[in-house]
Amino acid sequence: MSEHIERLKTLIIGSGPAGYTAAIYAARADLKPVMYTGMEPGGQLTTTTEVDNFPGYPEGIDGPTMMVQLQQQAERFGTEVRIGMVSAVELSDEPGGIHRVTVDNSKIIEAETLIISTGASAKYLNIPSEQKLRGGGVSACAVCDGFFYKGQEVAIVGGGDTAAEEASYLANICKKVTMLVRKDHMRASKAMQHRVNSLENIEIRYNTEVDEVLGEQVVEGLRMVNNQTGEKEEIPITGLFVAIGHKPNTDIFKGQLRMDDMGYIITESKTTKTSKPGVFASGDVQDKEYRQAITAAGTGCMAALDAERYLAMVASKEAVAS
């Protein structure tokens, strides 16, 4: 363990639209932010080939390029971006207290404010053919990527509200949607089930799972298996959407921050303030409803502004006390 302890005004944990936007605003406010990117620099967008729904890109942009540009913009204003993984945190309960962070199990950092932008990871099926074709027709976000499959045949995996909602969205733009539900019933609410069942171009396959995603460079088909009979069937598709949930990357904060039963950090209404003073959360780590790059960026802006105001308040109180 390193003996040297670094002291910062603002530490940002996690990159992606939320983290980089927070960095841009924090740097312009002279908070001298330092960002640790985590294991996936750039976040989920680095696995997205095309981003067409982020304002300001009339011709669209690929996810990795967008993240590089956001990083460059943050660095232009003075953000120091570091490759590293936060492995432990000790969060202060006191207003004006110092938060202690361990990076890569060795480096100790003390921060006056902490902005958490660690995101959420989409759950995948974790079969080799699916992983191979991520970005080549396999996606975990129909709202993000569905447009590229307009008029085509696609499949979606999942039986909850998210899967039903995304299947309905896809049905409006795709020729046919095959929905694979692992059990003999859907977990989605009755209202969502009625919506799915009312759409003629959605075919629901119950007791059905993915056996293999077909294709070398891009998705060309799907082999399904009935988990009751063992019968396999292949269908031609160009896109596979996995909608079996997300897991917020909040494990290192458990027991220290208020979270909901799914592990998402709870923030005060209309702010990014968490249950600890001087700790703010932005992006998918606290948003399970929208999960879009633009909404993540918005909360990143909010977190930096909240951090700036918090530091000003602390400084004002210290000045009065002295």
Image: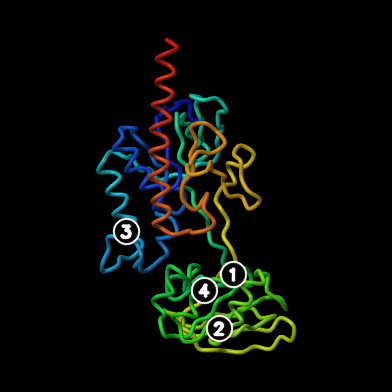
Q: Which residue has dot 3 on it? A: 66
Labels 3 and 1 touching (C-beta < 8 A) = no
- Indicate the colouring scheme: rainbow
Left or right: 230 with respect to 237? right
Marks 3 and 1: which is nearer the front?
3
Residue occupying image coordinates x 39% and y 57%? 294
Marks 4 and 2: which is nearer the front?
2
Residue occupying image coordinates x 61% and y 50%? 263
SS for tag 1? loop
User: Three-letter amino acid code at disc 1?
Assistant: Leu
- Measured Cα–Cα span from mark 2 to mark 1: 26 Å
Residue 243 placement: quadrant? bottom right
Q: Nearer the viewer, residue 214 or 92?
A: 92
Residue 72, above or below 220: above
SS for tag 3? helix
Residue 44, above or below 221: above
Q: Which residue has dot 4 on it? A: 241
- Measured Cα–Cα span from mark 4 to mark 2: 18 Å
Q: Which residue has dot 1 on it? A: 125
Residue 268, position in %: x, y?
53, 41
- Between discs 4 and 2, the one toward the N terminus: 2
Residue occupying image coordinates x 39% and y 51%? 297
- Measured Cα–Cα span from mark 3 to mark 1: 27 Å
Residue 322, position in %: x, y?
42, 10
Marks 3 and 2: which is nearer the front?
2
Residue 155, position in %: x, y?
53, 80
- Measured Cα–Cα span from mark 4 to mark 1: 11 Å
SS for tag 2? loop
User: Three-letter amino acid code at disc 2?
Assistant: Leu
Q: Which residue has dot 2 on it? A: 199
User: Three-letter amino acid code at disc 3?
Assistant: Met
Residue occupying image coordinates x 55% and y 36%? 89
